[in-house]
Amino acid sequence: MRGLLSFGRGLHTLSNRQARRKAGIVGSQCGFCGTQSNSKPQPNFGLLFDIDGVLVRGRMPIPAAKRAFEKLVDSKGQFVVPVVFVTNAGNCLRQTKADQLSHILGVPITQDQVIMSHSPLRMFKKYHEKCVLVSGQGPVLEIAKNLGFNNVVSIDMLRESYPLLDMVDHNRRPKLPSSAVVIHPKVEAVILFGEPVRWETNLQLVIDILLTNGNLNGVHQTQNRPHLPLLTCNMDLMWMAEANSPRFGHGTFLVCLENIYKKITGKELKYEALMGKPSELTYHFAEYLIRSQAMERQWKLPITSLYAIGDNLMTDIYGANLYNRYLEERLRQNPKAVAKMAAATGSTTAVPQDEDIDNLWESELALPSATSCKSVLVCTGVYNPNAEVPSDANRSIKETVFHGHRDFRFDPLLVEPGHIVQDVAEAVDLIFEQEKFVPK
């Protein structure tokens, strides 16, 4: 719940107009453009798909994925229900991921349907003009600038300027004494996009930045004072690729960073923000994109139900259930406001024009209209159906079972999926049956 209001207020920078312009989408190229015929069934639900372990394993598509999406598009290639892809990956741009999915699934996907773990960083405008250090892999500088950050420094840039700081790999140690060759501005915040290639280098330099308060010409200061703001995307401890067992994710890197910092200073590492699943911010943004698609298609029914399909109990299921808990609490507190919001967003007579969208972002449009977010677990990824979560919460579950991030409280109910199915094709069949939805 924390941060949802400020998130809603900050979303005005992500209008449909801007997203379509950046994607180069016009006319019928978008799977959600055009007017929906009244003779076709109109959905009142939306689907949130995880990617790794649900649709693909590494670079290999899961066979059930194509079968599932054959049921989700009509003969014109338009989706019959609103669909968003919610991934904790953060090593590429939204458009790049949309292009990859289009190729894998054989259906047209736009960047408006993709949420990366770093997507909510657009709302953190107070850091957009500050000097930020970014850690991860892929085009991290381009990603940061695309999100609105205008003064960005990478780990590689720091390493080149301060070669004496990266000393673990003997083959990369400088042969002669060296000094800084470039003077960078003082770092004012750190952004962790995802797991880097060289963990030792990134761990060392991020710790250096935190302990020198952003000035690598200084020495470590471990006295009791707040460290620089740390914004983190993707908390997955593990993820599923082509190997038989899960692989380390960015969450594992964070475990290392947190423990090194505490070992050196005796204090806990603090985060300014944690993004990606299971953060409520991510699901709130996903629901906005779902509603935007329904409005563009001029579907009359309000989107009241979300279905989140994933393979990881600690991120996909936890996050969906956490957001469902938020929606239920909101409905209990103010049922009239939720009903009014659902009615407003379901109206086809009030679809906003481009010039009106920015104002709506800051008012009703940014508020949730859904009343539930249901979790569906597939068995093609991280989840192992033979390793159930113990029912007794006192049996050291937090240490032996809970793989979620340190700052998220374990609750057995939050890792209990609404449904368990074999694969994503079965998930789509189940949801259509639950909603009594028969596409024509």
Image (cartoon, rainbow, N blue to C red):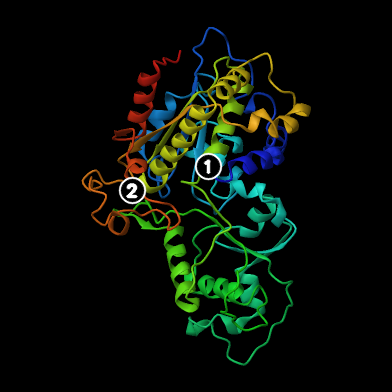
Q: Residue at x 55, y 61 (%)?
A: 136
Quadrant in the rendering for residue 177: bottom right
Q: Which labelled disc corresponds to residue 382?
A: 2
Q: Nearer the viewer, residue 349 or 100?
A: 349
Q: Position of residue 320 (x, y in %)?
A: 43, 38
424 relative position to 350: left or right: left
**Front-most of 50 and 258?**
258
Report if residue 31 is visible in the image: no
Q: Is residue 418 left or right of residue 152?
A: left
Q: Residue furthest front?
A: 333
Residue 184 drawn at (x, y percent): 73, 73
Q: Looking at the image, can residue 376 be seen?
A: yes
x and y percentages locating residue 349 in the rendered image: 68, 13
Q: Where in the figure is residue 156, as x and y percent of width and height?
A: 61, 70
Q: From the viewer's perspective, is residue 128 above or below residue 359?
A: below
Type of amino acid under label 1: Met
Q: Which residue is mark 1?
A: 1
418 with respect to 207 (left or right): left
